Amino acid sequence: MLSINKITIQEILNIQDPENFYVKLDKIDQFGIDTKNLYINDKEKLLQEMAFHHDTNRPTENATYNYVMDRAYTLHFIPYDEKNKLWLYVGAYYQTGTYNVKYEGHTTTYYKIQLEEQYSRLKGRLIVHFDRKPGTRQVRGGLETNFADRLTLHSILEQEISSVTFRDYQNIHLTYPQLKSIITNNEQKWFTALSTINAVYLQTDKKTGKQYVGSAYGRDKLWGRWKQYVENYHGGNKSLKELYEKEGPQYFEDNFTYSLLEVVPNSRKDMSNLVIERESWWKIALQSREFGYNNN
């Protein structure tokens, strides 16, 4: 971690026209939303909450506004360590229009926002100190004002915060929330690693001890197969689908882990047959047909 002092956001992001930038600190937690967790596990949902424009209340039809994006860019921060009044920079965004979401008789309007790469190289790494007044949901001010000067640079993380970092194939062991974070956020190191290998993998139900052995050798290989589990939890597997219908999605999120058992070389001409053979061997070795979720 690199520590820095007495340097402004404008300087560290090399911004030459501060009058075109807002700085916005989003708490967005009046409904129990954990913004730091969303950044790690579901950036798409976080961006929607950050882009809230206004809501039309059902009884009065009067618009309650959050903020108006009437400058070129907004620098967004979310809580990182509230006890120590630290905020995490999540990028510079610009708006390309609005869209509406209707729910229970009222309409919420959101901005369509896009990341501006030029000013976002430190997203998920840059941490600032800011003493926000208690009870305020979000704070915004122009980058050229005294408000922006109150954000004191605290530190820069060596890498973007993430649920887990890819290191090597020998030590892949993920919980469902970690796997979901990796797939949902399309983390490039993980995509590169998993989409290039044919593999035999293991799912473990921590609550019962039951296991499921599977294989991956099709499109996007292991990444593509594990993506299916993120999308529907069971991946179309008979026993896992029955478990999902009985226990629901939360059971998988709380109890399932995902591990890599074996990488099968791409160079083999009979690669798909070899993957299936190795999958069958692991089912025998782990007795996942007799005591687990494998049916074949």
Image: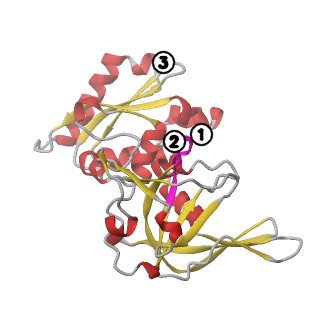
Q: Give whichever of discs 1 and 2 has the lower sequence position.
A: 2
Q: Is residue 24 above or below residue 4?
A: below
Residue 209 numbered tag: 3
Asked if the stretch drawn in magenta spans residue 190, the answer is no
Q: What is the number of callouts on the image?
A: 3
Left or right of 185, for residue 47: right
Q: Counting other residues with Cα less than 10 Å from the Cα at mark 1, is it few (<14), some (14-19), or many (20 or more)?
A: some
The reply to whether discs 1 and 2 touch (Cβ–Cβ < 8 Å) is yes
Q: Does the magenta stretch include residue 83?
A: yes
Say few, some or many: other residues with alpha carbon within 10 Å of mark 2 (under 14 / 14 to 19 / 20 or more).
many
Q: Of marks 2 and 3, which one's residue comes earlier in the chain?
A: 3
* Marking on residue 249: 1
Describe residue 7's horizontal placement relative to residue 198 as left or right.
Answer: right
The residue where tag 2 is placed is 233
- Of residues 174 and 118, the one nearer the viewer is 118
Q: Which amino acid does label 1 sit on?
A: Pro
